[in-house]
Amino acid sequence: MNKQTPLPGGKVWLVGAGPGDPELLTLKAARLIAQADALVYDHLVGDGIVDLARPEARRIYAGKEASNHTLPQGAINTLLVDLAREGLSVVRLKGGDPFIFGRGGEELETLVASGVPFEVVPGVTAAAGCAAYGGFPLTHRDHAQALTFVTGHLKDGTVNLDWPALARPGQTVVFYMGIGAAAEICRQMMAHGLPSMTPAAVVRNGTLPSQQTLLATLGTLPHRIVEAGIKPPALIVVGSVVGLHAKLNWFEK
Ligand code: SAH
């Protein structure tokens, strides 16, 4: 479809914007952003991506930093419905993939309840972006037979995560939103049987020019995070695949 063709109004496209590098957008995402009447975007969506919108498109920042919720989730849900009811084509842009820790599902439920039609466009999730640009294949078969994505946003400071399962060997475990809870995460992984020497890494600002990878072990990671002043957005990756960064890193020189 031609980029200039207007989209039908009264509809919402829930679109994954990928992990940062604008070139990791799908062709479909780039086209929809360039055509939309209104763009509602999150904190993790880069300027280079929002800039693809038409000059006259309405741009609405919906925020969402860990402790600074610009618009509460309920307000975002109703905003999407209101914009669609105004007859606009609305692109709801989320960092990474909208269905991976993106609360995209909740937004769609409100649209369904309000009778607003929608489509969903997947995106490159942060784990895939960080692994590719960090040079550690998440399931390199000499290292991992399974891959788990976990939220590190711990309710009440500790967690009802299935630690015994997460601490099983032969897998790679990726914690999203885990920087604030890094000490607790590493402590639990070791308490449930992983050696303190288990390789663990943090990747901050993956796929962006400012990408930073920190290689450590479960025993040393929390301290290293504090020492390096690592702030979100960053992933914690636990498992021996992170050691491949030394050999396969091509991006951070
Ligand atoms: N839907 C998103 C995740 C949203 S949760 C996705 O699929 O990627 C937000 C968390 O994602 C951040 O706290 C961080 O842990 C991770 N994240 C997002 N972008 C990142 C990036 N460029 N580098 C490292 N981590 C990132």
Image (cartoon, grey):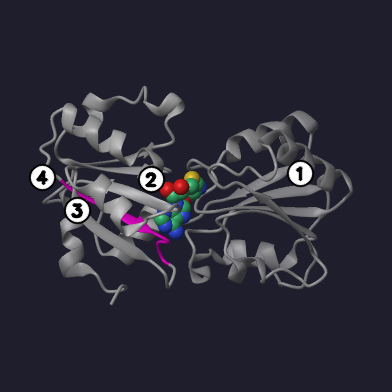
In-image side of 79 versus 122 (left or right): right
Which residue is tagged 3? 216
Q: Is residue 140 visible?
A: no
Which circle's residue, 2 or 3, is located before the other in the chain?
2
Give the structural element (helix, strand or loop) at label 4: loop
Residue 80, which numbered label?
A: 1
Which circle's residue, 4 or 3, is located before the other in the chain?
4
Residue extending farthest to the front is: 227
Give the structural element (helix, strand or loop) at label 2: helix
Q: Amino acid at mark 1?
A: Leu
In-image side of 136 versus 150 (left or right): left
Q: Amino acid at mark 3?
A: Ala
In-image side of 213 versus 47 (left or right): left
Which residue is tagged 2? 179
Mark 4 sits near ligand 1, with its Cβ under 8 Å away = no
Q: Is residue 3 visible?
A: yes
